Structures are given as C-alpha cells and as structure tokens.
C-alpha cells in the first residue's frame, strides 16, 4: 500500500528529524559556529534578518546553521521565534540623514554633497572564482586586513551625517510630495498585528515589502523594469550604514538611544508625475535590514510602481504585489502541497467519473438523476 | 514575563521542540495574541460565515500546514480540554501527529482519538464521522477562505461582493459548469450559503461533509493563517450548499462500496489501488471511527450519524 508510508506518525517523524541532523552535520568537517556564520556569511545573515523580520544577528546566524543554509527556512525559524516575543513598544521614527554610512552612492549626479562612498562592494570586481580562498591562510588574510586599516587611519574620517541627494531635488520643488498627505491621513499600521486591507496605507505597503522575500521582490520589480510596467528608475541615492534606534523613555517621554541597526536604503527617482498640474519627479522608497542592495532597490521600484492610480501591470497592482512577496507565506503554501490530499482528490475523482459517465455528456444541460448513487 | 536567553538554549530542546512549557506561555501564544484571537472569534460567531481579518501570528509550523487552525486551538485551549487532531480524517497522519505533539508539548493537555471524548478537535479536510455534540468545538484549517476567489482574484472586489451579497458570478460559474460538463465540477471546497446571507468556503472538506455542517450542534470555527481570516458557524446555523432547483447538490458516490477494514457503507471512503492486481479497494477516511466500528464487531453496517447523508 503506497499510503501506509506517510502514516505511522511519531516514529517516522522522529527518524526524519534524525536524518535531517545527519544531513546537516553528518560529514567529518568541523561544525560551524554561529559566530563564524555571523561574521563570514554576514550577507546571508542580513537576508535572514530582513525576511525573518527580526533584527538579531546572533539568532539569525543560528537559524541559518539550523536550516543548513536554506534562507527561506532560516527566515521562517526566526519569524516563529519572533512571534513569541511580547510587543513592548515602537521605536521613534529615525531620520536616515543620521545614518552612520559605510557606503553611499548616487547614480543621478556625478558629484553629490558628501561625495560618493563606495564602501565594501563587489560591484566592480570580476566574478572569477578565487581559488586562493580554497586554501586561505587566516594569518595572512588577517594581517592584510590589519595593514589596510592601519594605512587608512591617516585618512580623514567620514562625516557624521550625509545630506540626502533627493533633498536637493525636493528643495527645488522637483519632487512629488506624497508623504505629507499620506502620513497625516493614517497612523502607522503594524502589519504583524493587523491583516492587510486594500487599498493598503503606505506604512503597511512599506512594512510588507521590507519583510518580503528578496527573490520575490526582485522578480516583480524586474518585470516592471523590463517592460511590464512603466517605472524607469534612476537611483537617486543608495545608502548602507547604521541607523540609531531610539525609544521614548516613559518617565519623561524623552528619546533614548537603545542601539543601532544596519540597514540598506534606496531612493529611486522615476519619471514625471503630474499631480497638481506641475510636472515633477516621483520617488520610490526602499529600506531593509542589513546589507541587501538588491532588495532595497527592488523595494523602491515596487513602491513607486504601486503608486500608479490605474495598474496596468502586475507589479503596479498593490494587492498583487503585497499578497505575494512574503517568503514565509509563499514557501509555506507551496510546500503544503506535499501534505496528503486524499480526500479532496477523492472528491475530484468522483466529479470526473460522474461527468464521464453522464449519459447526457458535456454540452447538454440535462442533468442525470438526482441523488443517483448518492450516500 | 521572564524568558530564558534562548540563543544558548536549543541544546536542551528535544526533537526541535522546547522542553515542556518552560520559557513559553501556556499554549505558546502570548496573552495579548490569545485575547485578540478570541475577540475575533466572538465577532465571527456574531456574524456567521463572515470572514473576520485578524493579525495572524507566525507559528513554528509552515504557512499552509494549519497555522490558522493552530492559532484558534492555542487561543481556545485550557488545561481541562481534551484534544483530538485529524488530517484527512486520520489521527495518525504525519501532520496531525506533528500538530498534536506541539500543542500537547506547550499545554500538557490530554489528547484522544475518540471523537465523543474530545472537547476540542482540530481538523484538516474532514468532519469526523461520529456526530458531534453540543459544547464540542471543531476547528478547521483553511487554505483559501474566500469562496469567491474562484471567480475574482482581487480581495478588494470580493469584500465588496460580500458586503452587497452579490454572488451572481458564483451562480454563473456553477451554471456555466453545468452547460459545459453537464455537472457542477467542484469536488471539495463546495461553496455554501450561511444563514441565508454569507457565502462561505467550508475548507476543502468533501461534499460528503458539506451537508453535515448544516444545523450542527457543535461550534465550528474556521481559520486561515496565511490569509489572516477567521470565520464561524455557531451551533445550529443554517448552512446550504449552492444548488439549483433542477440540479440538486450531490455528495460523493461510492456506489454501495464498503470499507475493506470495518465494512462500513456509511462513511467517506479513501480509494486505494492494489499494486499487484490493479484493483481498487476502499477504506474509511476517518481512521478512529473505522477502528471503533471494527472493535464493536466489525463488518456490520453501523449508523455513523442520525439524519446524515
């Protein structure tokens, strides 16, 4: 009997879990420490934090280890941990001008106030396999890093804050200001506590995108860039850096800094809009946990695409985008098809057999005997 | 609420689950989440068949695997409850085992496979064959709560259709089905009208179970975790499958076949194909019911319910 195999409950599940552990750690190489993952696979950790919607590098590294490198699964583990944490309060809005920047570029202007800061980026490297890394000497690598930073000490430190590139355009009145009206109209929604309703307020849109799955956001944003949509983005500014987190302190209501988070922010300038008669540029905004430029840019493009009043492409349809970008939901639902569906399939089988045996056959409305062969 | 630093704790976890309740609230969810879910349940009960949005929490099982049902179960369960969990009618199906084990681990409640002994039953795709009693709660796991999704992809639009009780496109769908195939082709997940007002997705139960929703004495609750919707059938609610006067609703036909294990001819049967002979055979989908019939003497046609199909 084929289906006996999926029954049998406890013991089978227990053994499957043991096999899973063997698959993760069954080799004879040294076991990974979460610290190694956090430090050396930091982009994976950042992605897991972003999609898991919890800023916790150590826990994200642990989840990545537990999930054997499956970023969907790791984000899922982190989310289901997050859900058990009480909601203590909300941080104060943070102005990203105050970001402690490690990278900041603009594709709109050659020279921007504060300058273009490349920071750690693979953008201009040749993606050739580096065979030296296969036998990397920790000592040599660490020494090279030390020497690099020693040489850099003589350079001027980066300024505390960088002016925003889009602020230049804003000052000239060249940007559509949708923020004021939208922010005043509705308080900030918490999508982890309220189901989305449509049309979703912008705060709900941005939250949903920020915890969306990188690949999912990218696919939808790419469809828009390629032609199923009309956003022709220019990256006004892309920043990576550390943003202070402040909460109001109950006794006096004053803001206290409780730490900082690493984020990536993208501001995308798109084609003209004509809201109040005057032609202006429009802006798309993306911000996500950690260093994940692809996600921030895709998010900004989608944010802009969804502002279309008459959606003409899937990526411009708010409901289409927001209900399909969550990795935990989409991967969970995709995999649930592995669960048994005997009953529903039996029911469908009954319909198919019935239709095929129907004397009147397709095309004629005459129904067969009611209740014939019923229960 | 104090909580152990969990970063270093997983070494103590057995089978990927926390040891007992230590470090977690009773029934996993925090008190605020439970309160919110209970309030939404009350609203759902007050408007039978109407989908009530809620802030669905992430669960340690995947979306689509019963996170909605699980949240209702966890929000409702108390230490005195007796829990039964079934998947496709069976208590020993892997997902049912996994969910039961989780709830048991975070609550310590008693579990059972015996339908009448349970106070709370979580189910995927079936209603137990044995009749339910008043004060029992049946929690359905729902993949797609919106019956109109078949004809309309947009949530904004389906909300409007419900508000206006505009179900014409659903009726048209059924009519076109009959014109094309001579039959309504919907197998499981057959749309029902609740209390003559709201069109409701009964979850992917077979049509066999659809008639058993009607005026059932138990409280029936439905929840879709991924889609973030709760809806309810209070006890004794009128539930009617959509049907035409001249094309009545019909449940699955087993053409007089009986369960090969217990001999029942009055239960929903799973079909199996014998590898060697290629012959089809049938067995009860409700494993606990089947077992009970067998123990009671077997191979006699039992009366699984009164006034049922």
Image (spheres, coloured by chain):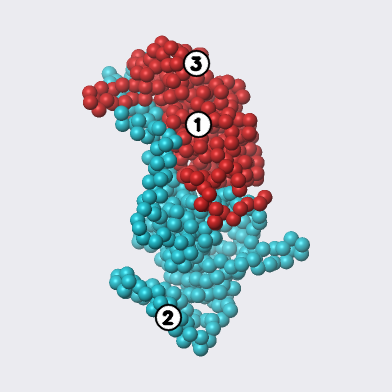
Chain colours: A cyan, B red
Q: Chain of mark 2?
A: A
Q: Which type of secondary structure does the marked residue at label 1 adopt?
A: strand
Q: Residue furthest right?
A: A251
Measure the C-alpha gap from mark 3 to mark 2. Answer: 79 Å
* Residue A327 location (% of width, % of height): 45, 52
Q: Residue at x 61, y 48 (%)?
A: B23
Closer-to-camera residue (A341/B107): B107
- Quarter of the figure with the C terminus of chain B: top left
* Residue B140 location (% of width, % of height): 51, 32
Q: Are marks 1 and 2 in contact (CB under 8 Å)?
A: no
Crowd band around label 2 with a 10 angstrom C-alpha radius: few (<14), some (14–19), many (20+): few
- Say if A239 sits above or below B244 in the image: below
- Say if A94 sits above or below B146 in the image: below
- Say if B144 sits above or below A167 in the image: above
Measure the C-alpha gap from mark 1 to mark 2. Answer: 59 Å
Q: Are marks 3 and 1 in contact (CB under 8 Å)?
A: no
Q: Which residue is mark 3?
A: B305
Discs 3 and 2 lie in a common subunit: no
Closer-to-camera residue (B26/B237): B26
* Residue A309 location (% of width, % of height): 49, 55
Q: Which residue is mark 1?
A: B85
Q: Residue at x 55, y 77 (%)?
A: A162
Discs 1 and 2 lie in a common subunit: no
Q: Which residue is mark 2?
A: A143
């Amino acid at each position: 009997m084929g289906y006996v195999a999926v029954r049998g409950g406890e013991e089978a599940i227990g053994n499957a879990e043991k096999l899973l552990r063997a698959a993760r750690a069954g080799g004879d190489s040294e076991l990974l420490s979460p610290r190694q993952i956090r430090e050396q696979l930091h982009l994976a950790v950042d992605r897991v934090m972003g999609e898991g919607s919890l800023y916790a590098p150590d826990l994200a590294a642990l989840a990545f280890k537990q999930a054997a490198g499956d970023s969907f699964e790791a984000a899922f583990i982190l989310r289901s941990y997050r859900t058990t944490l009480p909601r203590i309060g909300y941080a104060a809005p943070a102005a990203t001008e105050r970001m402690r920047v490690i990278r900041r570029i603009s594709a709109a202007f050659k020279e921007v106030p504060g300058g273009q800061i490349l920071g750690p980026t693979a953008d201009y490297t040749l993606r050739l396999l580096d065979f030296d890394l296969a036998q990397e000497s920790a000592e040599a690598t660490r020494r090279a890093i030390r020497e690099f930073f020693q040489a850099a000490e003589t350079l001027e430190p980066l300024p505390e804050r960088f002016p925003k590139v889009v602020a230049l355009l804003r000052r000239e009145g060249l940007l559509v200001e949708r923020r004021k009206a939208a922010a005043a109209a509705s308080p900030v929604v918490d999508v982890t506590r309220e189901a989305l309703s449509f049309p979703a307020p912008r705060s709900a849109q941005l939250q949903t995108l920020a915890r969306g799955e990188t690949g999912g956001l990218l696919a939808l944003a790419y469809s828009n860039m390629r032609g199923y949509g009309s956003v022709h983005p220019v990256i006004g500014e892309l920043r990576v850096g550390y943003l202070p987190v402040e909460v109001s302190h109950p006794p006096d209501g004053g803001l206290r800094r409780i730490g900082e988070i690493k984020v990536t922010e993208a501001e995308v300038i798109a084609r003209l809009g004509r809201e109040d008669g005057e032609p202006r540029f429009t802006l798309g905004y993306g911000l996500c946990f950690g260093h994940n430029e692809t996600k921030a840019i895709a998010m900004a493009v989608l944010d802009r695409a969804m502002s279309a009043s008459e959606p003409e492409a899937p990526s411009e349809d708010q409901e289409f985008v927001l209900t399909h970008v969550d990795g935990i939901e989409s991967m969970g639902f995709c995999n649930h098809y592995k669960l048994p569906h005997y009953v529903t399939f039996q029911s469908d089988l009954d319909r198919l057999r019935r239709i095929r045996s129907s004397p009147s056959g397709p095309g004629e409305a005459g129904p067969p005997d009611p209740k014939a062969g019923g229960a | 609420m104090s909580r152990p630093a969990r970063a270093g704790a997983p070494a103590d976890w057995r089978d990927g689950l926390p040891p007992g309740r230590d470090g977690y609230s009773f029934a996993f969810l925090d008190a605020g989440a439970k309160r919110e879910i209970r309030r939404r349940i009350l609203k759902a009960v007050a408007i039978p068949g109407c989908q009530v949005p809620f802030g669905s929490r992430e669960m340690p099982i995947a979306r689509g695997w019963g996170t909605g049902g699980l949240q209702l179960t966890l929000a409702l369960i108390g230490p005195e409850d007796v829990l039964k969990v079934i998947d496709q009618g069976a208590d020993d199906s892997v997902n049912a085992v996994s969910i039961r084990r989780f709830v048991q681990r975070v609550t310590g409640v008693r579990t059972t496979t015996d339908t009448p002994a349970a106070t709370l039953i979580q189910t995927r795709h079936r209603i137990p064959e044995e009749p339910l009693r008043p004060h029992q709660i049946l929690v359905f796991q729902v993949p797609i709560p919106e019956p109109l999704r078949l004809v309309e992809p947009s949530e904004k639009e389906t909300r409007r259709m419900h508000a206006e009780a505009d179900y014409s496109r659903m009726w048209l769908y059924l009519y076109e089905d009959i014109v094309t195939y001579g039959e309504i082709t919907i197998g499981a997940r057959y749309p029902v009208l609740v209390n003559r007002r709201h069109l409701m997705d009964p979850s992917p139960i077979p049509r066999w179970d659809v008639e058993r929703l009607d005026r059932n004495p138990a409280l029936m609750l439905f929840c879709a975790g991924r889609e973030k919707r709760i809806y309810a059938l209070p006890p004794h609610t009128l539930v009617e499958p959509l049907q035409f006067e001249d094309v009545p609703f019909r449940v699955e036909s087993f053409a007089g076949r009986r369960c090969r294990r217990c001999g029942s001819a009055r239960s929903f049967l799973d079909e199996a194909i014998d590898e060697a002979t290629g012959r089809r055979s049938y067995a009860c989908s409700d494993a606990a019911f089947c077992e009970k019939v067998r123990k009671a003497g077997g191979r006699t046609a039992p009366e699984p319910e009164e006034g049922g199909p």
